Image (tube, rainbow, N blue to C red):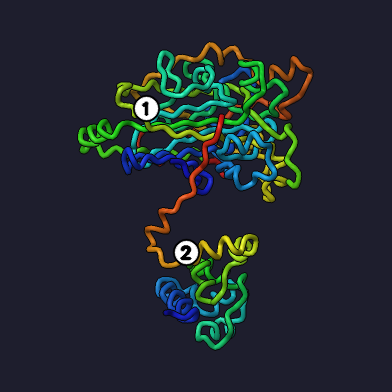
């Protein structure tokens, strides 16, 4: 079951276990420059507002309503990262796709869990996902672009602009496997560390956005070490997150979208922190050949003679806060601006 | 059932025990009303203030705004608007659920619908 609580998607599986509860947040952030360098983690600037599409059905295209789910507003060239929290430490396998292209492997969406290559992230080990896994230990940031202009990962992989948006599916560990884990780690009392890092007429089709590849960032997707048979493949919940252009958000919902976030340069010049994350003893998955081959928004823009990214100045963060996977540290990845 | 005045006064005085800034005069000043007015409200000697004043009072005293409004015999504007837009539906809903125990009401969840994709 999925509920919208505030601006979080809360997945729960009461038939599996009362502890099986996963919170997924879509965080606003800075767009990191696409300058060939590898960047640190940008801060969270607060959640994107999420709304049920059903609540605004009269102002949305029929396909959005058919797909169900929720929607959020993004400006062209705005970036996003996804935060995963399992408050009780209950393990989940979470698949993330953009335009139904898997963000970890570049493969087309399919149900179930797959390995070789691993096409999901394992929570709570994985606190967040900032983009497409282009190389082992590196991602390209999720950046919003209008669907249909050729920039999104979906369009580059499939040649079509059919879906857009973001898709999330979660499935829990089996109850018996969890109970075994709880018994084994009773002494460790290891809870998931709180890891805050910081219309009228139906709208025209161009308001639909998808995600493309932005600048490069150091980020590992951790290899799942659970035995495959411990995942409860019968219990899964999925959600389609539509992305609407912020410029039309008001005409759809009657409320203002968040303001345009600061540029990486403005933020860094203000001396505000970037982050570096380190998890001991975990292996990273290999990058996806498919995703490594997609062109970034900046590169495509140059080829087309467009300027899709208004601001791409390189930055040199002076203030990088190290975060690590230890419950003791008050790990905050937030930047008040 | 507590009156609005008693509820506000008891809360303000409890806060004042730990912090002198919760005197009648200072709270009134921060909320933007005359101390004599706030005093009358606390003693039930004046009709309740406007929704906006009640909200500021609730915020100042860290009280739930809907509770304060209800004690004042008011329903917040946003709830009124919800009912006004579909009066038969929401009136029926509230009447149907009015005697449901707390835990049963809290179990009524709105699920995110997964459609066809």
Q: Residues within 10 Å of mark 1 (few under 14, many from 20)?
A: some
Let me know if marks 2 and 1 both belong to one chain: no
Residue placed furthest toward the bottom: B45
Instruction: Using a 10 Å C-alpha cutoff, classify the residue at mark 2 as few (fewer than 14 neighbours), some (14 to 19) or many (20 or more).
Output: few
Q: Which residue is at a point 69% across and 27% down the rendered structure image? A: A147
Which quadrant would the N terminus of chain B be assigned to in this image? Answer: bottom left
Residue A153 versus residue A242 in the image, above or below = above
Quadrant of the rendering where the C terminus of chain B is positioned: top right
Q: Residue furthest right?
A: A305
Q: Quadrant of residue A307?
A: top right
Q: Position of residue A135 (x, y in %)?
A: 51, 15
Mark nearest the camera among 2 and 1 is 2
Question: Circle 1 — which element?
Answer: loop
Q: Nearer the viewer, residue A47 or A31?
A: A47
- In-image side of A254 versus A8 (left or right): right
Q: Give the quarter of the image for residue A205.
A: top right
| Residue topped by disc 2 | B96
Q: Answer above or below: position of A307 versus A4.
A: above
Count the marks: how many?
A: 2
Callouts 2 and 1 close, C-beta under 8 Å? no
x, y (%) of residue A184?
Answer: 21, 33
Q: Chain of mark 2?
A: B
Q: Position of residue A168 (x, y in %)?
A: 50, 31
- Identify the secondary structure beneath mark 2: helix
Q: Is residue A304 left or right of residue B60?
A: right
The residue singled out by tag 1 in the image is: A233
Seen from the viewer's position, the closer of residues A206 and A110 is A110
Horizontally, residue A171 falls left or right of residue B61, namely left
Q: What residue do we see at 36% from left, 22% from top? A: A224
């Amino acid at each position: 079951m999925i509920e919208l609580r505030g601006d979080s998607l809360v997945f729960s599986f009461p038939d599996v276990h009362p502890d099986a509860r996963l919170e997924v947040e879509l965080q606003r952030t800075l767009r990191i420059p696409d300058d060939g360098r590898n960047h640190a983690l940008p801060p969270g600037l607060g959640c994107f507002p999420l709304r049920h599409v059903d609540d605004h059905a009269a102002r949305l295209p029929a396909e959005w309503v058919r797909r169900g789910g929720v929607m959020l507003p993004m400006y062209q060239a705005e970036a996003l990262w996804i935060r995963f929290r399992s408050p009780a430490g209950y393990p989940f396998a979470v698949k993330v796709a953009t335009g139904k292209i898997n963000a970890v492997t570049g493969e087309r969406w399919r149900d179930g869990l797959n390995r070789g290559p691993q096409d999901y992230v394992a929570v709570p080990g994985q606190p967040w996902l900032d983009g497409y896994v282009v190389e082992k230990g590196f991602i390209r940031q999720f950046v919003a672009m209008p669907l249909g202009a050729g920039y999104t990962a979906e369009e580059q992989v499939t040649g079509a602009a059919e879906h857009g948006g973001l898709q999330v599916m979660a499935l829990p560990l089996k109850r018996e496997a969890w109970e075994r884990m709880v018994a084994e780690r009773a002494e460790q009392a290891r809870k998931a560390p709180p890891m805050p890092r910081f219309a009228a007429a139906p709208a025209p089709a161009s308001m639909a956005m998808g995600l493309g590849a932005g600048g490069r960032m150091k980020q590992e997707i951790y290899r799942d070490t659970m035995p495959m048979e411990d995942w409860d493949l019968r219990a899964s919940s999925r959600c389609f997150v539509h992305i609407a252009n912020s410029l039309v958000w008001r005409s759809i919902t009657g409320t203002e979208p968040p303001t345009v976030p600061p540029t990486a340069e403005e933020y860094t010049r203000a001396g505000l922190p970037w982050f570096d994350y380190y998890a001991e003893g975990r292996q990273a998955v290999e990058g996806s050949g498919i995703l490594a081959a997609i062109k970034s928004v900046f590169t495509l823009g140059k080829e087309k003679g467009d300027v899709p990214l208004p601001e791409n100045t390189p930055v040199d963060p002076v203030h990088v806060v190290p975060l690590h996977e230890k419950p003791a540290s008050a790990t905050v990845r937030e930047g008040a601006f | 059932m507590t009156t609005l005045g008693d509820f506000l006064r008891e809360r303000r005085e409890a806060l004042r025990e730990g912090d002198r800034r919760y005197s009648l005069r200072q709270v009134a000043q921060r909320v933007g009303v005359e101390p004599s007015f706030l005093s009358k409200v606390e003693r039930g000697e004046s009709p309740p203030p406007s929704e906006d004043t009640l909200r500021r009072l609730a915020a100042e005293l860290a009280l739930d705004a809907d509770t304060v409004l209800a004690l004042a015999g008011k329903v917040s504007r946003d709830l009124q608007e919800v009912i006004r837009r579909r009066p038969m539906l929401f009136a029926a809903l509230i009447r149907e659920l009015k005697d449901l125990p707390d835990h049963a009401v809290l179990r009524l969840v709105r699920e995110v619908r997964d459609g066809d994709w």
